Amino acid sequence: MEEESDIPNNTSEPFIGRKDLDPETEKFFYGTWSVEKLLGFADHYNDASEYPTGQKIIGDQIVIDQDFFSSKGFTGYQTYQFELNKPIYNIEEIHYNADSFYRVDKIDLKSINMNDEVKILGVSDSSTGLAEPIGFLDINNDRLLLMLEATVFELERVPE
């Protein structure tokens, strides 16, 4: 059995900036997702994070398609409800290990392993160019996490 090491295999510096989604990330990211469970909070959070329970969105859904984005499923939270035609999706950060992700974003999630690659994905309105206050963590193109304020939730793909 292979043990997870406390020393990262890849110590490359993180990418911090803005770039288009790559084809593998697009294939993984697009779809309908359901909020499954609260994973935790950043080391710093505000009242909008609703600590210690998080926002009440378990079971709510998000639609992420190339030409459409909808978080209207967050019925109890008007501030997080968006419908965007032709949204802009970007990779804002890429971390090549959990330490790098923690150093920059101050979020310590036990479910992120030392050698996981973490991409932070953002959503912007193409008509204004402004980013929406909702973000995603793509873990190895295998798991998708939702960030609202400083609160992190696990998402699960809804079968088509």
Image (tube, helix red, strand yellow):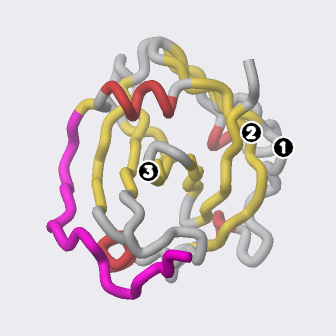
User: Mark 2 near mark 3, Cβ–Cβ under 8 Å?
Assistant: no
Residue visible at 21% across and 42% down?
Answer: 18
- Give the labeled residue for mark 3: 140
Q: Considering the numbered disc 2 on the image, is that residue within a helix, a strand or a loop?
A: strand
- Residue 116 vertical position relative to residue 124 in the rendered view, above or below: below
Mark closest to the chain's N terminus, 1 or 3: 1
Residue 1 is left or right of residue 98, and the answer is right
Q: Please rate how many residues cluster around mark 3, counting C-alpha atoms within 10 Å: few if below 14, some from 14 to 19, many from 20.
A: some
Number of callouts in the render?
3
Residue numbers of the magenta segment: 1-19
Q: Position of residue 66 (x, y in %)?
A: 45, 16
The x and y percentages for residue 22 are 29, 30
Identify which residue, 42 or 30, lies in the foreground: 30
Q: Is residue 138 magenta?
A: no
Q: Quadrant of the C terminus?
A: top right
Q: Dot 2, crowdedness within 10 Å: few (<14), some or many (≥20)?
A: some
Report, in whole angstroms, how far the alpha carbon at label 1 lies from the one at label 3. Answer: 23 Å
Q: Nearer the viewer, mark 2 or mark 3?
A: 3
Q: Are marks 2 and 1 in contact (CB under 8 Å)?
A: yes
Q: Amino acid at mark 2?
A: Ser
Mark drawn on residue 25? none
Residue assigned mark 1: 59
